Image (cartoon, grey):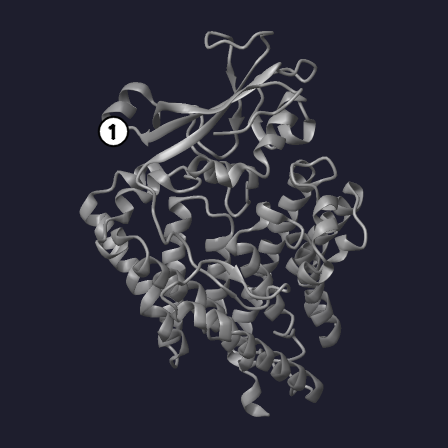
Amino acid sequence: MEWFTAPDYWLSRLLFQRALAVVYLVAFLGAALQFRALIGERGMLPVPRYVERVPLRYAPGVFHLHYSDRFFAGWAWAGCAVSAALLAGLDSRLPLLAGMALWLVPWAMYLSIVNVGQTWYAFGWESLLLEVGFLAVFLGNDEVAPPVVVLFLLRWVLFRVEFGAGLIKMRGDPCWRELTCLYHHHETQPMPGPFSWFFHHLPRPLHRVEVAANHVTQLVVPVLLFTPQPIATAAASLMIVTQLWLILSGNFSWLNWITVVLALSAVDFGGTPPDTPSAPIWYESVVLAVAALLLGLSYRPVRNMLSRRQVMNRSFDPLHLVNTYGAFGSVSRVRYEVVVEGTADDVPREDSDWREYEFKGKPGDPRHWPRQFAPYHLRLDWLMWFAALSPAYATPWFGGLVERLLDNDHDTLRLLRRSPFPADAPPRYVRARLFRYRYTTWREWRETRACWERTYVREYLPPTRLAGVARIS
């Protein structure tokens, strides 16, 4: 069938596949380096306990069959190796069926991780990586031109990512309709980046222009993805520019990066396509069958988008094949941070020698300027932002974090920027306090070189020792 393939998109496919392999590599690397303290056998939310109460059919994956920290580490590092092989183009050197099988491997491996990751993996970009990764299996390699149907499905994902985010904003916080959300967003976003302070201090009229442009990019431009070229390329290119702007303004894991990857698949880069034989009948049949399945599964995400009670970042099947997306339906006006401290004193008093634990990404020391981590995902730092919004977000795991700090747990301390206690002398007590943070003004920054100013609000967790972790309040 001549209509089945689009030879002109050979370079788009190549860039998409190599860029997606990078995202996979970052995801597996993060899992390998962070899992022990988070979901390991002695982690805050151990996988063995989770698989005991959640049946395999609700969370399919290899860890229902066997789990040990050594096995998980090998699994994650193997995922890194497969991702690196795909980045090097191994799939293009294999027969078509073998290349498809190779792309299926990281999808299945990461699905196993996400389905036992619990709250640490409850982010929209996890499902997005799995949905996009599944489509990549059927995009083919150098033995066949890119199939039109899969290219369409990739645009369909991109449409839902952008349009869903646009709808959730218009239905959510009034500041999006009033064009004022960026008066607050750069200061209150989960993990500011090195340029967020400067973005916050842009003139307010420019912030209003940014919000208006965002609405156009998310509510109008996505429709143009399904128009003829060069309009579709222009629409995808505008999305890429917008995502790069967001990448500069904050640390949103690989959400923006994988959106760029998706947009690359819609860009017609031109050039003379290589000669490829006609697609095999079996390949056409498989692609069309998968497309029919995914379009059928799109019913619930579409119904969610059209609903007045639209929800963000929901997966409707345990394989994460078709999901719904969205971000920042509401924007906080005030930033709160949980500051964790320990003391070696035998009796904890307000005037004790309380020393602050420093996290890698989340704000702590007002003089510590934020760093760029995305697309790498600092899972503990992100959950600490949620914990500051409400103790309910922290209930499942915060007590486990405190216990491990009191024990100077090596794997937990590796997730931090700095522990104030030597490895052989853990603290006697740990406490947590809630602070209000705000960006300093230009004048304050020139005088103090601090990017934050913080004010004590209340106790978050009273002084706690290893014998029993108190409840957070």
- Determine whether 419 is above or below 289 in the image: above
In the image: residue 107, left or right of residue 217? right
Query: Dividing the picture into quarters, in which one does residue 367 lie?
Result: top left
Q: Residue at x 24, y 42 (%)?
A: 202
Which residue is most to the left?
205
Measured from the top left, where is residue 65 in percent x and y?
A: 80, 55
- Determine whether 228 is above or below 59 in the image: below
In the image: residue 173, left or right of residue 10? left
Mark 1 element type: helix
Measured from the top left, where is residue 277 in percent x and y?
A: 66, 86
Q: Residue at x 51, y 55 (%)?
A: 124
Query: Dividing the picture into quarters, in which one does residue 343 lie?
Result: top right
- Determine whether 443 is above or below 280 in the image: above
Measured from the top left, where is residue 329 in percent x and y?
A: 37, 54
Q: Residue at x 76, y 56 (%)?
A: 62
* Residue assigned mark 1: 442
